[in-house]
Amino acid sequence: MKSTIITSIIAAICFTSCKTDSSNKSFEKLEKMSWLVGEWENKMPEGNLTETWIKANDSTFTGKTLFIKDKDTLHSEEIVLTQKGETLLYIPTVKGQNDNKPVEFKMTESKTENEFAFENPAHDYPQKIVYKKVSDTNLVATISGKQQGKQSSESYPMSKK
């Protein structure tokens, strides 16, 4: 009787630890971008760009980007960065664009744990969004693609607050 109880306890412990282990691994791609969590900014003569990221849960980070000049908000977007299965998705919703509906960009490359590219070739502009960690306190976000028939690219360096 005692050996049955002990065997049941050991089996339960193994099952629980295996279950926890596999759930941690299931969002491995998203976890590689955990360096993004925090507040980032770029103060420019044209205005202040801020991007704030939080970890919503194991599978999702949420972000908010604001570009403010004086007291006017010139650009505002909400972003969801989520892992569904093996796919990492970057989903921005930009006020005043795309009927205020979200647009999905799929991760297409991850050259290192410090650089991630997301693409949506069907989107008008941008078609590609790249986040690159330069250091623990600096990153560069780059948007690129064809705009009015010409290749275009804009980079936004930011520092951690």
Image (spheres, rainbow, N blue to C red):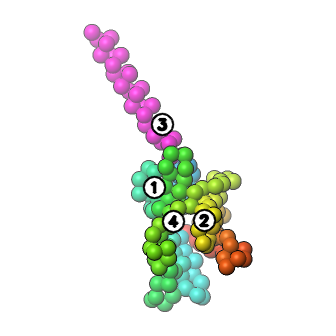
Q: CA distance from mark 1 to mark 4?
A: 16 Å
Q: Which residue is mark 4?
A: 103
Residue 16, position as x, y percentages in the image? 39, 31
In the image, which is nearer the foreground, mark 4 or mark 3? 4
Q: Amino acid at mark 2?
A: Ala
Q: Earlier in the sequence, mark 2 or mark 4?
A: 4
Residue 23, position as x, y percentages in the image? 45, 40
Task: From the viewer's side, name the closer residue of 113 and 151.
Answer: 151
Residue 49, position as x, y percentages in the image? 54, 78
Q: Amino acid at mark 1?
A: Thr
User: In the structure shown, which secondary structural element does the residue marked by tag 1 occupy?
Assistant: strand
Q: CA distance from mark 4 to mark 3?
A: 30 Å
Estimate how packed mark 2 is, as few (under 14), some (14 to 19) or many (20 or more) residues with alpha carbons within 10 Å. few
Estimate how packed mark 3 is, as few (under 14), some (14 to 19) or many (20 or more) residues with alpha carbons within 10 Å. few
- Quarter-wise, where is residue 132 in the image? bottom right
In the image, which is nearer the foreground, mark 1 or mark 4? 4
